[in-house]
Image (spheres, rainbow, N blue to C red):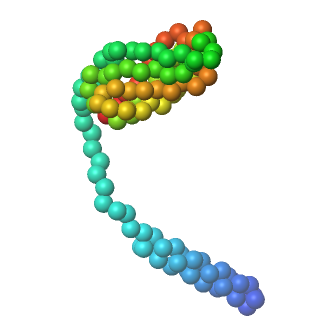
Amino acid sequence: MYVAPLRLGRITALLALAAVISAAAYGFTGTNTVPPSSAGDGAGTISGYNVTNVQYFLNASNPQVLDRVEFDLDAPAGTVTVRLVTPAGTWYSCTNPSGNHWQCNTPGASVAAANELRVVAVQ
């Protein structure tokens, strides 16, 4: 089979280019480093929290608006949020002023619309 010299030159150039790209790609994959990490699987009991001493604070100038909710949990928690309207109400973040006491500011929350106090707490 006869291949024209110009065509053979193009094929050779393409093969050379493919070899260079392959070598470069291999070089990049060889330089990736992955930091050590841990993985695992396990099971544990989720016990939940008991919520006590719930207090609702109304807005001083408009008592139809709820300014904040405060309550105590029976154990320490790291993050706490509350929702006052189900099923698609706003979630409000809470702060921990001391011990297991939590305060959740609820600006603009309507007293009339509130139909639940859902507390989500995690360690």
Above or below — where is 91 with respect to 66? Answer: below
Quadrant of image for the N terminus: bottom right
Q: Residue furthest bottom?
A: 5
Viewed as shown, does residue 2 lie left or right of 100?
right
Which of these two is toward me, 4 or 17? 17
Which of these two is toward me, 69 or 113? 69
Which of these two is toward me, 60 or 100? 60
Query: Is residue 87 at all visible to an observer of this figure?
Result: no
Q: Who's the residue at 50% across and 22% down the image?
A: 68
Quadrant of image for the C terminus: top left
Residue 83 position in % (x across, y down): 50, 21
Q: Who's the residue at 75% across and 89% down the image?
A: 6
Q: Who's the residue at 59% across and 12% down the image?
A: 63
Which of these two is toward me, 28 or 3? 28
Residue 92 position in % (x across, y down): 51, 28
Viewed as shown, does residue 85 lie left or right of 38?
right
Query: Is residue 115 at all visible to an observer of this figure?
Result: yes
| Quarter residue 4 falls in | bottom right
Above or below — where is 39 with respect to 68? Answer: below
| Quarter residue 89 falls in | top right
Above or below — where is 29 with respect to 7? Answer: above
Viewed as shown, does residue 40 lie left or right of 30?
left
Residue 105 position in % (x across, y down): 51, 27
Q: Who's the residue at 71% across and 84% down the image?
A: 10
Total number of numbered labels?
Answer: 0
